[in-house]
Amino acid sequence: MAVNSAVSGAAERAMRSTLLTLSHRKSLGRLATRVPITRPMVRRFICGETLDEALPSIRRLHDLGMGTTVDVLGESVTAEADARAAAGRYPAVFDALVANGLDHNVSLKPTQMGLGISKELATETIGSIMAKASEVNGFVRIDMEDHTTTDDTFAVWRAVRPAGAGDLDKADIGIVLQAALKRSEVDVEQIIAERGRVRLCKGAYKEPASVAHQEKADVDAAYERLMLRLIREGNYPGLATHDPKLIQRAVSVAKAEGIGPERFEFQMLYGVRRDLQEQLNAAGWRVRVYVPFGEQWYPYFMRRLAERPANVAFILRSVWNDRGSK
């Protein structure tokens, strides 16, 4: 039994590594977006390629009593014009969210905003989105990408964050910590001191052992430590996990220590564990769903598959069953 478990674990790690490697293949991404068979698979995790396609999904979640954060998919741009164009899409997103009475909450990738070109360009583009957020009393979340961008991402976040930010009733910009990165144990203390708004996730990038935990048990343990620190002392953290054990641990500690639902929220991905999202929401805990849309969905989609390689077979079966029932 132990041998079989070890073999299974090794196979899953190999599959995850392969999927993460493929997520960087732009040629495969271009091919994938042109092949019709991928569309039913993709729509499980991505709610459309345009804002108009995404709005009904955002409305449905809102009507269920859940919060949302909207991401216009894209990353790793290499041309300044592309970074400026990506930033230019976000004001329209905010306007649509305001017009429809939905959460004024968005997420973005720093390399989509030009971080790979220069820190100054990313500061300018993300700063322009933050200016729009301030107009509508909105919230922006800067996602965290692989470890090579971490320091620059923190620098941009600090540069564009409004003076005196931290009040939940005012516009603000948040940051993400990845439990897999060993440095997050130190980063969390600094962000707590700055009253920063943290989304805590496990990490969805292939990182070297020198900077990141490699075993699932180690990542889970790091997540729990950071999670409890943020629940107790953080400024309305977002706990981004679909792990029932970690969620139950958060709920148990919150109840035992008198930490109410107004102090933090659970965050989950569109299309992942919808049953768990609805259970937590029904139990009175706050839930926010990360809702991505856009034509540049391939890297994001591949990372979702890599997080749980069993999703590959599951989605293929679902697509086949859907085709057979028509």
Image (cartoon, grey):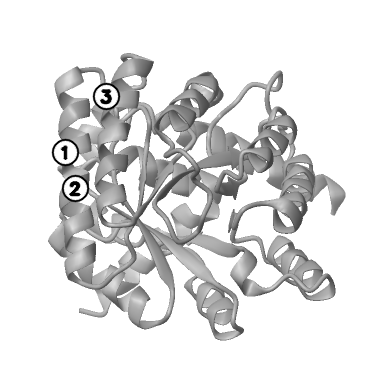
Which amino acid, mark 3? Val
On screen, residue 19 versus residue 27, left or right, reads: right
* Position of the N terminus by quadrant: bottom right
Q: Position of residue 310 (x, y in %)?
A: 54, 55
Q: Position of residue 176 (x, y in %)?
A: 54, 41
Residue 77: image tag: 3
Which amino acid, mark 1? Gly
Single out the mark in the foreground, 3 or 2.
2
Q: Position of residue 21 (x, y in %)?
A: 46, 28
Q: Disc 3 to disc 1, how far (Cα)?
A: 14 Å
Residue plotted at (29% across, 19% down): 121
Which amino acid, mark 2? Pro
Residue plotted at (31% across, 56% down): 46
**Label located before the other in sequence (3 or 1):** 3
Local secondary structure at mark 1:
helix
Residue bearing mark 2: 91
Q: Disc 3 to disc 2, how far (Cα)?
A: 19 Å
- The answer to whether marks 1 and 2 mark residues whose Cβ atoms lie closer than 8 Å is yes
Question: Label 3: few (<14), some or many (≥20) within 10 Å?
Answer: some
Does residue 295 lie above or below 159 as drawn?
A: below
Please state which of residues 281 and 244 is positioned toward the viewer in this rendering.
281
Q: Position of residue 311 (x, y in %)?
A: 48, 56
Single out the mark in the foreground, 3 or 1.
1
Residue bearing mark 1: 88
Q: Disc 1 to disc 2, how far (Cα)?
A: 6 Å
Local secondary structure at mark 2:
helix
